[in-house]
Amino acid sequence: MLESLHEHRWDTRKELALVIFDQIETWYHPSRRHSYYGMLRPIAYEQAHRLAAVAA
């Protein structure tokens, strides 16, 4: 995803910054495993937490 940023010409630095932020927040962070979550992806951790709360 971020690798293709150099292939596009951006009109402003702000536009580029928004695209980078969007890529990080919508692709990288949700898919990255976190040690805080027991090496689960954030979405998997949230799903497990919700299931545990419903079962309780």
Image: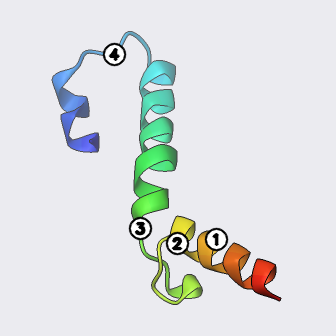
Q: Are marks 2 and 4 in contact (CB under 8 Å)?
A: no
At 25% from the left edge and 15% from the top edge, which residue is drawn? 9
User: Quarter-wise, where is residue 51 in the image?
Assistant: bottom right
Q: Residues within 10 Å of mark 4 (few under 14, many from 20)?
A: few
Residue type marked 3: Arg
Q: Residues within 10 Å of mark 2 (few under 14, many from 20)?
A: some
Q: Earlier in the sequence, mark 1 or mark 4?
A: 4
Q: Which mark is residue 46?
A: 1
Residue denoted by label 2: 44
Figure quadrant of the C terminus: bottom right
Q: Earlier in the sequence, mark 1 or mark 3?
A: 3
Residue denoted by label 3: 32
Element under label 2?
helix
Q: Earlier in the sequence, mark 3 or mark 2?
A: 3
- Nearer the observer: mark 3 or 2; the answer is 2
Left or right for 53, reference 4? right
At 52% from the left edge and 90% from the top edge, which residue is drawn? 38
Q: Are marks 1 and 2 in contact (CB under 8 Å)?
A: yes
- Nearest the viewer among 46 and 35 is 46
Residue type marked 4: Trp
Residue type marked 1: Glu
The total number of labels drawn is 4
The CA span between labels 4 and 3 is 27 Å
Element under label 1?
helix
- Nearer the observer: mark 4 or 3; the answer is 3
Q: Earlier in the sequence, mark 2 or mark 4?
A: 4
At 48% from the left edge and 59% from the top edge, which residue is drawn? 29
- Nearer the observer: mark 2 or 4; the answer is 2
The CA span between labels 1 and 3 is 14 Å
Q: Which mark is residue 10?
A: 4
The CA span between labels 2 and 4 is 35 Å
15 to 1, vertically: above or below = above
